[in-house]
Amino acid sequence: MTSFRDCSRGISHPHRLDASNGDRLENKECIRGVEESYDNSHSSYEMGINHGYRYHERDRPRHMKRGRHSESPLSSVSKSDSRVARVWFDELPPDSIYSYKDLKAAFLAYFMQQKKYVKDPEEIHNIKQKDGETIKDFMEWFKVETGHMKGAPECMRISGFMHGVNNPKLTKRLNEHVPKTMEEMMITTTAFIR
């Protein structure tokens, strides 16, 4: 006889030829309980995108204590960040998450990286175009790096870009008509590339 407790722990019992209908009903109940642990009401599921796995607090085994050190990294997302996490989750490719381990790895790779690279705005002047790096690649790298720098005034970003680029013709053009905004500078740089 299979109990729900056994099923939730992944313990299965072989079917016997003489198994009663009651045993089979219990197995169906067990399967239904497992199916209910997957949440199909998620917005991306309703739109036809199914990542294959939904983690819920109720999926955590009861014997695991909820202490500071045993919490899921997903619980480290504050309420204000939950919308960002929801957008991130909705944009995951279909069928890219098959287990909690996959979800955890993808989540940490995306969100922990953002927290790890919060930089001092003064470091903008340390962002330099490398030899052999295209201007377009440098523009993208500069946007990414300065995106991790909170509180940097736009004039500092403009100055940092102008000092970081190593193309003398572009530097001359930017110095002749110094852009007033980052957007204007990116438009000027893109026009220069063409």
Image (cartoon, helix red, strand yellow):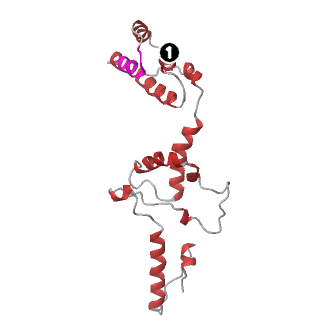
Give the total number of marks visible in the rendering: 1
**Residue 79 part of the magenta segment:** no
Picture coordinates of residue 31, whole percent (x, y): 46, 76
Q: Nearer the viewer, residue 76 or 127?
A: 76
Quadrant position of the N terminus in the picture: bottom right
Identify the magenta region. Answer: 179-189
Q: Amino acid at mark 1?
A: Ser
Element marked by disc 1: helix
* Residue at mark 1: 159
Along the horizontal axis of the image, is 115 left or right of 177? right
Q: Nearer the viewer, residue 131 or 93?
A: 93
Write the residue at 45% across / 70% down.
36
Quadrant position of the C terminus in the picture: top left
Q: Is residue 146 above or below residue 88?
A: above
Q: Is residue 112 above or below residue 99?
A: above
Q: Nearer the viewer, residue 28 or 149?
A: 149
